[in-house]
Image (cartoon, helix red, strand yellow):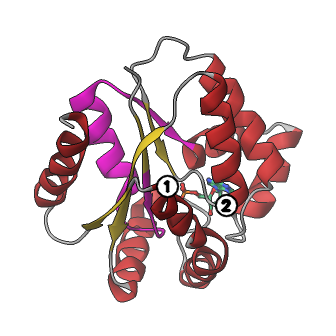
Amino acid sequence: MVFNIVLFGAPGSGKGTQSTLLAEKFGLVHLSTGDLLRAEVQKGSSLGIQIDSYISKGNLVPDNLIVDMLAAVLDSNEGAKGFIFDGFPRTTDQAAALKKMLAVKGTDVALMINLSVGEEELINRLLYRGISSGRTDDNYETIQHRIKVYHEKTAPVKAFYESLGCAVDIDGTGSLSEIFERIQSAVNAVINT
Ligand code: AMP
């Protein structure tokens, strides 16, 4: 059985860290669109330069570009036990595109985990990460904009999965292991049904 998880939440909610732990624990492929985009930027390609103009301002990269990139990665991972989508989908159009892409492969999203963290803590975490991350978007002004974009464009994705009946809310505060315990229980509850 292919088991796909969407790890959802605002910037700074801990999606990346928890996705890494989950991927290891359940043998799934971790797909972070942010990491894939930053790798393209690193290459210095003309596509990378274009991508960087969105990321560094805290804006979303256009849907068509993201969906094409993701389709290619899915195709190159045929035979995977399942995927953890981290930072994707970020719009309801992306969510619909993902559903279609997975349907072609005879699978779907089994679980959408919403990591919930208060806004003040999100900002503090991102500012702290900015000290060492070297990311162009981890500064106060861009963080504010990313959170605004999250509310306007990404938050509606939650309702998309709620209407499909596969969304769970998880408290994203506390220690990494406490949060991971909560996530594991949610995953096990779906695996065991
Ligand atoms: P992240 O690493 O998930 O925080 O993403 C960093 C930045 O990459 C975002 O602020 C967007 O500019 C871009 N990005 C990542 N994933 C997506 C996506 N699914 N759709 C559009 N833009 C994205």
Residue 66 % position (x, y): 73, 45
Taking 117 as reference, is 183 left or right? left
Occupied quadrant, residue 146: bottom right
Q: Residue at x 18, y 35 (%)?
A: 192
Nearest the eye: 140 or 18: 18
Q: Residue at x 30, y 24 (%)?
A: 27
Residue 22 % position (x, y): 28, 39
Question: Alpha-carbon neighbours of circle 1 within 10 Å: few (<14), some, or many (≥20)?
Answer: few
Instruction: Say whether residue 43 is visible.
Output: no
Quick one: SS at disc 2? Answer: helix
Q: Residue at x 21, y 37 (%)?
A: 193
Q: Is residue 13 above or below residue 121?
A: above
Residue 2 % position (x, y): 41, 23
- Which residue, as the protein is rendered here, is positioned at the far right? 46
Pointer 1 residue: 164
Nearest the eye: 42 or 102: 102
Q: Is residue 58 above or below residue 47?
A: below
Dot 2 amino acid type:
Thr
**Earlier residue among tags 2 and 1:** 2
Dot 1 amino acid type:
Leu
Quick one: SS at disc 1? Answer: helix
Image: magenta residue range: 7-32
